[in-house]
Amino acid sequence: MIALIIQRIGMKRSILGIGLLSVVFLSSCEDDEVVDVTAPTIELEEPEYGEAFAAGGTIHFDALFEDDIELATFNISIHNNFDGHSHGRVAVSPFTYEQSFELTGKSDDVHEDISIDAEATAGPYHLTVEAIDASGNSTTFADGSSQEVEIWITNEEMAHVHFEDANENEVEEYEGEVGVALQFYGEIEDEVGVLDHVEILVGHMEEGAEHDHDHGGRISQDDEHIFELEVEVEGETSVLLQDLLANESIIVSQSDLDELEEGEHLYLIVKVQDEDGNISQHSIEIHFD
């Protein structure tokens, strides 16, 4: 009888020991479980910074999304980046876009064509891209994991700038001489409506910004521009660049040129807004021997 009792006590101890081992094993498994705290990454290929798109056309979007475990969704947002210098006027129809999409796997290469309203107001717009993984980790602008680029929308109503020489011949760049007042010629014209105001700057574009006569690029905000002028031209359909600058003396010194980083150039930048709120930006390089 005593032997049987001892045997039963031993069995209970064995069962208790197995239970404790199971608890320890499960606890160990829980401790080894991977906790996902890493946000996805976004490699935005298109659109490029400063790229221009016509109202009524499409924006081609191309981006690669990656995550260490599992992707979930991403969001594209487009909104205007108008500077607020509308002088009480409201833009006709700023283009907006907001759409979320599903993602799959650890890596997903996404291509989308975004339609632009045919009546979209011309000007600079910000396109932003954000992503979330299956664990809820989100990209942020604070750490640069979310992406944002400035693009330009153009339309047939916006004003144009024709850069010319003193003989009214179109030019691809202006020639400048250090220490000598620069001379600029050309016409600012609105073929459909009337002008509101014009901003004229001499400065440089930030690295990586695209620029051409149609829409310009990103104007550097890091330093003071060599020259800045804002002129009211309300009700005019066209004005001459040389008339707007008739009372100005724009002189570039050698120290101004020495402050440019390698590969940077100075530009004449003309930003025009018409009375319908359309904004266009045009730039042309100033070449110094």
Image (tube, rainbow, N blue to C red):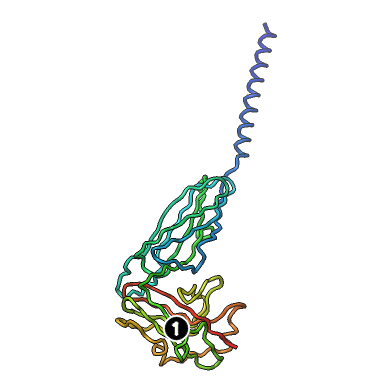
Residue 74 percent across, percent down from the top left: 48, 52
Residue at screen point 40% across, 78% down: 160
Query: Which residue is outermost to the right?
Result: 3
* Pick the front one: 232 or 192: 192
- Tell me: 235 left or right of 150: left
Residue 271 percent across, percent down from the top left: 42, 78
- Tell me: 270 left or right of 237: right
Amino acid type at circle 1 is: Glu
Quadrant assignment for the N terminus: top right
Q: Is residue 274 above or below residue 78?
A: below
Residue 254 falls in which quadrant of the image? bottom right
Residue 96 falls in which quadrant of the image? bottom left
How many numbered marks are there? 1
Residue at screen point 31% across, 83% down: 236
Judging from the image, what secondary structure is the residue with disc 1 in? strand
Residue matched to label 1: 228
Residue 251 percent across, percent down from the top left: 51, 90
Residue at screen point 66% across, 16% down: 11
Residue 19 percent across, percent down from the top left: 62, 25
Mark 1 surroundings within 10 Å by alpha-carbon count, few (fewer than 14), some (14 through 19), many (20 or more): few
- Tell me: 38 left or right of 88: right
* Pick the front one: 7 or 100: 100
Quadrant assignment for the C terminus: bottom right
